[in-house]
Structures are given as C-alpha cells and as structure tokens.
Amino acid sequence: MHALFVIDIDDLKNINDNFGHAFGDRVIVEISETISSIFRDADIVSRFGGDEFVVFAAHIKDMDFADKKALELCNTLRKSYGESENKQNISASVGVACFPVHGLVYDELFERADESVYKVKEQGKNGYEIYTAKQEK
C-alpha cells in the first residue's frame, strides 16, 4: 500500500500580505522542512504550487499510518506569526488517497486526495480527510 498526501497551507496569503513575500518565503521553507521531518527519508516530499505540497509515502503498513501522518501534519503545521495585534495564523488542509484502494495511477490518487482537501476546506479548513468513494459526485 502507498499513500499520496495533498497538503494545502491555509491562509498563507495573509502572511505574505501582512509581513511581505520575503517573510512568506521563509515560512514556506520552514513548512517544507517541517513536512519533511514528519515523513521517512524514502518518502517523496514536493512543493506543488504556491501553498501546496504533495507527499508520496511508499510501502506503508496500513491506512492507520496515513491517518496518523495526516493528523500529525495538521497539528504540527498549525502556527501563529506576528504580535498580538497583527497575529496571522496558518494551518493545513490535508487530503489523502491510498494505492490500490483509491486508485491505481497517480492521476487518480491525486484527483481523489485533492478532492478530499476541498472537502476539508468546505468544512472550515485546518483538518484532514482520507478519501472515501462516497465523496464522488
């Protein structure tokens, strides 16, 4: 079994708008280091656009691994920046799809993990969802 994680950083735009893009870039580097530290050396971590990351975790034991890693991502990436009157918060919306249960090729896995991210965002952000077939339209 393998797991594909799509991680969207919630409200990163507010960091850039309030503290500037140079500071936002440092936050992105910090986020990428944090994500990498959560996963194994053999897992593939990649930035996928401005505020999205993708992680491919190969040869996982079971879905429980994916569930624990998604929860750890959410808990670890929830942070505040700035002083009390100008505090900006970020968090993560995470979607997960697993091979072979949710798809057999990358495109299927990505589409389903991404769909799960949007489900989390519709529910208020700052959480995770492992794909289920009942999400399909």
Image (spheres, helix red, strand yellow):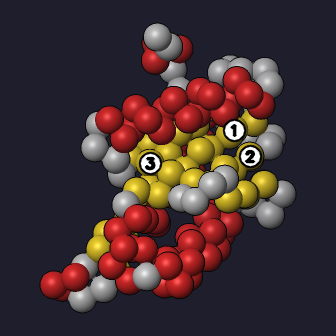
Image location of residue 78, percent across then percent down: 39, 65
Location of the N terminus by quadrant is top right
Of 63 and 16, nearer the camera is 16
Mark-to-mark CA distance, 3 and 2: 16 Å
Q: Which mark is residue 38?
A: none
State the residue at coordinates (53%, 84%): 22
Does 83 appear above or below 58?
below
Image location of residue 38, percent across then percent down: 62, 63
Mark-to-mark CA distance, 1 and 2: 6 Å
Q: Which residue is mark 3?
A: 93
Element type where label 1 sits in the image:
strand
Dot 1 alpha-carbon crowd within 10 angstroms: few under 14, some 14 to 19, many 20 or more: many
Q: Is residue 33 left or right of residue 76?
A: right
Q: Is residue 9 left or right of residue 55?
A: left
Mark-to-mark CA distance, 3 and 1: 16 Å
For marks 1 and 2 on the same chain, the one whose residue lies earlier in the sequence: 1
Of the residues shown, which amino acid type is indicated by label 1?
A: Ala
Of the residues shown, which amino acid type is indicated by label 2?
A: Phe
Does 49 appear above or below 81?
above
Dot 3 alpha-carbon crowd within 10 angstroms: few under 14, some 14 to 19, many 20 or more: many
Image location of residue 86, percent across then percent down: 22, 82
Q: Which residue is mark 1?
A: 3
Q: Which residue is mark 2?
A: 56
Element type where label 3 sits in the image:
strand
State the residue at coordinates (51%, 29%): 115
Looking at this view, name the residue that lies furthest to the right.
42
Does 10 appear above or below 57?
below
Which quadrant would residue 114 be assigned to in this image? top right
